[in-house]
Image (tube, grey):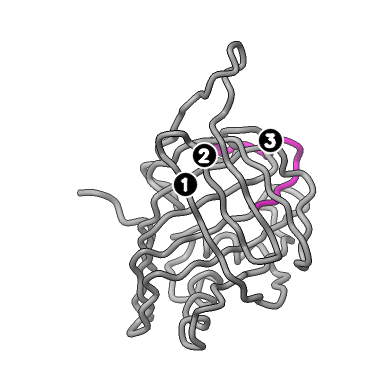
Amino acid sequence: MTDWAIHGQEIGNCNCNPGCPCQFSQLPTDGTCEAMLTYRIDKGHYGSVQLDGLYAAVIYKWPGAVHEGNGQMQMIIDERATADQRAALEAIMTGEDTDEFATMFYVFSLTSPTKHETLHAAISLDYDRETGTGSAKVGDYAETNVQPIANIVSGDPHFISIALPKGFEFTEAAMACGSTVTRNAAISLDKNSGTHAHIAELHLTGRGVERAA
């Protein structure tokens, strides 16, 4: 199995209520799931292929809950990536060289038998921890914007995080409210407005999430 690791940041947005029932092992808000996850790789490798400084994103859509399967996915990889780097990122994001169920890449790929052609684009990801606002832009294909959840009484920013000591995506993430617009991609997201978003530091390997000692 090829050794790989990714350290960086993720912005994700799905169609569920803020907080996302999946984080609590519950069914999705409206019974379906659609999402876009965007990644900035600060440091990473796949075997001898270096991935530092690259970006990637994946658009997903399932007709029911993720674990029920029959989903579809489309990867968008940084246009600056070399052929070897593109192949490496595709392998990672389709769950290759990964222990069973060890990462979200493995699980989401396993439950998405329809895999559309990989796209290539300029990708950016920005997040301000102090204000809780950020965005992920994926060429002409998609854009996610996030902001703090609004306090239900005052409307003031409501900052909250979720810890998943045994999660397959992150150990802890900031919860937010987000929206995603897709264009020209094979998968169209049409429910992601003012819905769940999270921002997390990624520490992933083929064995799963790396956790602090």
Question: Relative to 18, is 155 above or below?
Answer: above
Q: Earlier in the sequence, mark 1 or mark 3?
A: 1
Question: Relative to 176, is 64 above or below?
Answer: below
Q: Earlier in the sequence, mark 2 or mark 1?
A: 1
Q: Residues within 10 Å of mark 1 (few under 14, many from 20)?
A: some
| Residue shown at the point (51%, 56%) measured from the top left | 125
Question: Badge 1 is on which residue?
Answer: 127
Tags 2 and 1 touching, CB below 8 Å: yes
Q: Give percent across and percent down for residue 61.
A: 72, 56
Taking the view exactly as shown, the residue that stands out farthest to the top is: 153
Q: Give percent across and percent down for residue 107.
A: 55, 60
Q: Give percent across and percent down for residue 130.
A: 40, 35
Three-letter residue code for mark 3:
Gly
Gap in angstroms between the C-alphas marked 1 and 3: 17 Å
| Residue shown at the point (76%, 37%) measured from the top left | 30
| Residue shown at the point (45%, 70%) measured from the top left | 54
Span colored in magenta: 24-35
* SS at mark 2 in the image: strand
Taking the view exactly as shown, the residue that stands out farthest to the bottom is: 83
Which one is nearer the viewer's eye here, 82 or 28? 82
Three-letter residue code for mark 2:
Thr
Three-letter residue code for mark 1:
Tyr
Q: Quadrant of residue 116?
A: bottom right
| Residue shown at the point (66%, 33%) measured from the top left | 17
Tags 1 and 3 touching, CB below 8 Å: no
Question: Badge 2 is on which residue?
Answer: 133
Question: Badge 3 is on which residue?
Answer: 194
Q: Nearer the viewer, mark 1 or mark 3?
A: 1
Q: Quadrant of the N terminus?
A: bottom left
